[in-house]
Image (cartoon, helix red, strand yellow):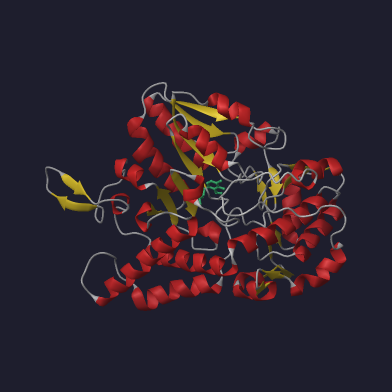
Amino acid sequence: MEELARGFFPELFNRSGNKGSGGSSYSPIVLPLDGRREEPARRKAADSDKRVGNEPLSKIRADFPILSEMVDGKPLVWFDNAATTQKPKQVIDRLTTYYERENSNVHRGAHALAARSTDAYEASRAKAADFIGAADPDEIVFVRGTTEGINLVAQSYVKPMLKPSDEIILTYLEHHANIVPWQMIAQETGALIRVAPVDDAGQIILPEFHKLLSSRTKFASLAHVSNALGTITPVEELISAVHSFGAAVLIDGAQSAAHMPINVSAMDADFFVFSGHKLYGPTGIGVVYGKQALLEAAKPYQGGGNMISDVTFGRTLYHNPPAKFEAGTGNIADAAGMGAAIDYVKRIGMQNIEAYEHELLEYGTRELSKIPGLRLIGTASRKASVMSFVIEGHSIEEIGSRLSEAGIAVRAGHHCAQPILRRFGLEGTVRPSIAFYNTFEEIDSMLRILRQLV
Ligand code: PLP
């Protein structure tokens, strides 16, 4: 047990104040894991008095209508937050208000509703910029989500500069969305993909990462948090290493943006992408942050209305970024919805969210590790949200459906991250993933089912 704790929270054993990734203005959270903490029963009783920052957990949960749903007569427990998060009524109401009072196309038409929808759209761009510490809202391009964002950067910025034998650096932790777009452009250009390995805890082996870098390195695209293991990667160190070879870096923030403060300027990311739906916002909207000079250098990969300043049959003049990358009618309503989601989490405070989720993760991990035959997959020293596991003698499908019968939604499968699971000799895991509206009591109900199973 101590072995596991040492692997998972080494700072508890060695309080050297090891600085982590993800923005420089806050310290990693260090929580005691030494038996001095409240016992589960006491904590369970206290769930209703819990607060996330200043906000009572009961009030937070009441904001999310779906958390009151019953599934086959049992209260829904939503532990599939890495796939998508539930939406507070502030977000749902924002969508209704948009369609009831503001709906219009943006940037066109000189009428009152065009002004309202443009205001809503651009206000959300400014909120997204502020949320991730971008220098200017014009560095924010709206896309459908992380997947589209990575494809945009691959096609618009990276592909045009690639020559045969140039190299793109990934890590073993990547989601398929951060593998396939790079393979596609590598195949077209003759470039090569190099992959940094991870250790048995699921942490990037830094000396191996450094060894991959050379004058052939043209770009790196790296997960901030692994969706399959929960590993938080040391993005600042990785970015600065890649920069020292003159190459740019994209950080895949799909699994980090909802769980920790993000500051793209402090981490010096060249591109940062995330999805609104994993941040309590609507589906179909997400963000590419790009440094202004890089967005200016990139070629648009879709053409159409909105992105042009002048068109003749002979040539087209493009708008400046971000409009250059937003051909056609954008997802205006959902951008407004994402703005409301950002307002919501900012009010609670990302550091408060991070601290509370860390307590849940620490508790869940410790209790899961006591279940006979259960193997945790991903025991990095810094983790967020995800507790992947398998149990000897039980298929992941069986575990997933036993939990589902109890109203507990977890993902059982490959999580669109086959290479990292195969690194651990697996084709799938059971993956509960938590958010700040989850409770210790919900973790206890999952543990009860698992104990009955084994
Ligand atoms: N990258 C990571 C790390 C993810 O976890 C996901 C989704 O699970 C994606 C990219 C793709 O996100 P989306 O499906 O919202 O485009």
Residue 333 lies, with reference to residue 424, above or below; the image says below
Tell me where residue 323 sits by quadrant. Answer: bottom left
Residue 115 place in picture, x, y as percent: 28, 72
- Image point (77%, 70%), residue name: 47
172 displayed left or right of 370: left
346 displayed left or right of 433: left
Does residue 299 show up? no
Report the quarter where the N terminus lies: top right
Does residue 93 show up? yes
Residue 159 place in picture, x, y as percent: 36, 33
365 displayed left or right of 258: right
Q: Residue 349 versus residue 253: which sits nearer the camera?
A: 349
Residue 247 lies, with reference to residue 375, above or below; the image says above
Q: How many marks?
A: 0
- Image point (51%, 63%), residue name: 281
Q: Residue 321 versus residue 414: which sits nearer the camera?
A: 321
Q: Residue 204 versus residue 36: which sits nearer the camera?
A: 36
Residue 110 place in picture, x, y as percent: 20, 72
Residue 117 place in picture, x, y as percent: 33, 70
Q: Residue 246 versus residue 432: which sits nearer the camera?
A: 246
Residue most extreme to the top: 165
- Image point (48%, 75%), residue name: 93
